[in-house]
Image (spheres, rainbow, N blue to C red):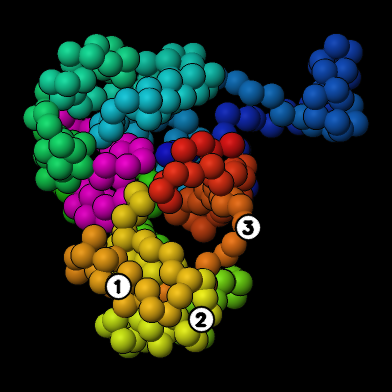
Amino acid sequence: CFFPLAREGTKTMAEVEVDRPSSQLGASAAAAANNFMGVPASESFRFHRRFSGGVPEYVRELGGDKGRVIEKVLIANNGVGAVKAIRSIRRWAYDVFGDERAITFVVMATPEDLRANAEYIRMGDVIVDVPGGSNNHNYANVTLIVELARLHGVHAVWAGWGHASENPILPDTLARSDPPIKFIGPAGPPMRALGDKIGSTIIAQTAGVPCIAWNGSGVMADYDRSTGSLPEKAYNDATVGSATEALEAAKKVGFPVMIKASEGGGGKGIRMVDKEENVQTAYRQVCGEVPGSPIFIMKLSSNSRHLEVQLLADEYGDAVALNGRDCSVQRRHQKIIEE
């Protein structure tokens, strides 16, 4: 949800209070209140209504010191992700405003997507041609995304997943625009802190989250919330700097182990090792696959399942855990199915 959540004492979402006794509303309304809300008929109940004044009225009524009106969004993604985003927001807009076009979408279109007659392009209100080829020329190109956002006067950018969505430079640069452009997702500092495998594990164990054994077990540090960085000493203490260090760390952690690049992903920069004689070779292979990335070693969890829990948080400090999902069906360390 990219609109501010209601603060305490304000109306929530598209709900308004009715403080009249149910006797003044009629028997049918009282019964509906009982059935839907599960409260005594004499108490007030809530019902959903539409905001005829559109997004500005909606934001104004919800309140919040950071309330901002978002009526135009750049979709910096393609394929099914873009389709889901546009479709979901339009369905929500129709429910709340009675107008699915209350939010305008600017979409990026490569020659390849245009030739494929991609559905998300047909759904967009404004279509912008962008270079084709690999995603560093289009959907992962932060400079291009920011330029398009400023040129078309959008209020927010939705990058979805993949491409530029996990690049903290994007939200940082959008925030420095004049006027600032909202990135629909985490701000740069927390994205920078949690996007690094070594750093995020240090933050987790500092917060008391149980972590599997690794070479950085016991390293505690608080990260700088303004920059998303950890103290250099703590980070270095949790990093394996050479093949010799890797062998010593693997012995300490206990075989079998996983040698991983902190900046790896997509099946790259990861090796399973179950014998001492293979550690140094595997370490060099990981370094070669993700050049310049810090390396760490973690205990292999055998006969386990890969479970994830989605978290949704806002900039006021409110957070909620959503559905969990099983991502155990994998090939070459890449998820194939999420259940």
**Magenta segment range?**
152-174
Viewport quadrant of the C terminus: top right
Residues under labels 1 and 3: Cα distance? 25 Å
Residue 4 position in % (x across, y down): 46, 43
- Count residues near mark 2 (Cα–Cα under 10 Å), then give few for <14, some for 14-19, many for 20+: some
Q: Quadrant of residue 141?
A: top left
> Is 160 a magenta residue?
yes
Q: Looking at the image, is mark 2 or mark 3 earlier in the sequence?
A: 2
Foreground residue among 78 and 23: 78
Depth check, mark 2 against mark 1: the one in front is 1
- Count residues near mark 1 (Cα–Cα under 10 Å), then give few for <14, some for 14-19, many for 20+: few
Q: Looking at the image, is mark 2 or mark 1 earlier in the sequence?
A: 2
Q: Mark 1 points at which residue?
A: 281
Q: Mark 3 points at which residue?
A: 303
Residues under labels 2 and 3: Cα distance? 18 Å
- Rendered residue at 38%/79% (across/down): 277
- Rendered residue at 54%/42% (across/down): 329
Name the amino acid type tagged 2: Val
Foreground residue among 333 and 29: 333
Residue 295 position in % (x across, y down): 32, 73
Magenta span dominant secondary structure:
loop
